[in-house]
Amino acid sequence: MVRFSVSQDGVWAVNKFVKNHNHELARPDDQHLLRSSRSISDDNAAVLKFMSEAGIKTVDAFTYLSDEVGGVDNLGFTKRAAYNYIQKERIAKIDTGDTNSLIKLFKERAIDDNMFAWDVETDEDGCLLNFF
């Protein structure tokens, strides 16, 4: 195990070295699964976001992007990362107290996930009481 740090001047220094704490390197076929190799580029994020906003399912957007680059191994992120990104974007749209946005989000989620169920309880004035 080796830990490095990089100074503001760009000088690398070894902070820690433990000779008997080693692991095999990831095989080339598995490198795309490493956390350090998983990041959604700005271009791919924009495509995911636009396709999601157009009503295209996340899995279909992910498949499209992976086909464009010759397979999942070349994409640089996992299907789970794509789902997490879309979910994060949807949640970011919800302003505090914006019940209509939350209901819209839940309707969209129910379309993408058959196991997702939700319900809402309102009072006589139509104000939100409970979400289930």
Image (cartoon, rainbow, N blue to C red):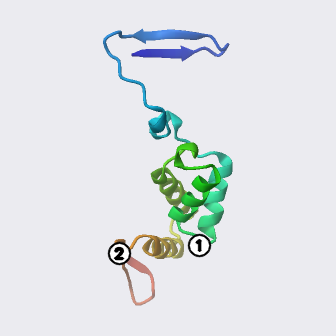
Q: Along the polypeptide, which appears first: circle 1 or circle 2?
A: 1
Query: Which of the 4 image quarters holds residue 48?
Result: bottom right
| Position of 24 relative to 10 (above/below) | below
Where disc 2 sits, the SS reads: loop
- The x, y position of residue 105, in whole percent, is 50, 71
| Position of 70 relative to 20 (above/below) | below
Measure the C-alpha gap from mark 1 to mark 2. Answer: 19 Å
Mark 2 = which residue? 117
Which residue type does callout 1 highlight? Gly
Query: Which of the 4 image quarters holds residue 27?
Result: top left
User: Which residue does the image show at 52% across and 76% down from the upper left?
Assistant: 100
Task: Give the quarter of the figure containing the N terminus.
Answer: top left
User: Which residue does the image show at 50% across and 68% down from the upper left?
Assistant: 97
Where disc 1 sits, the SS reads: loop
- Dot 2: few (<14), some (14–19), or many (≥20) neighbours within 10 Å? few
Q: Nearer the viewer, residue 79 or 116?
A: 79
Q: Nearer the viewer, residue 120 or 44?
A: 44
- The x, y position of residue 64, in whole percent, is 60, 60
Any part of residue 38 in sight: yes
- The x, y position of residue 6, in whole percent, is 58, 16
Mark whose residue sits in front, 1 or 2: 1
Q: Nearer the viewer, residue 124 or 53?
A: 53
Q: How many marks?
A: 2
Any part of residue 34 in sight: no
Q: Nearer the viewer, residue 26 or 56?
A: 26
| Numbered mark located on residue 27 in the image | none
Which residue type does callout 2 highlight? Ala
Mark 1 = which residue? 55
Q: Residue furthest bottom?
A: 124
Contact between labelled residues 2 and 1, with CB atoms less than 8 Å apart: no
User: Which residue does the image show at 52% across and 40% down from the upper left?
Assistant: 38
Task: Give the quarter of the figure containing the C terminus.
Answer: bottom left
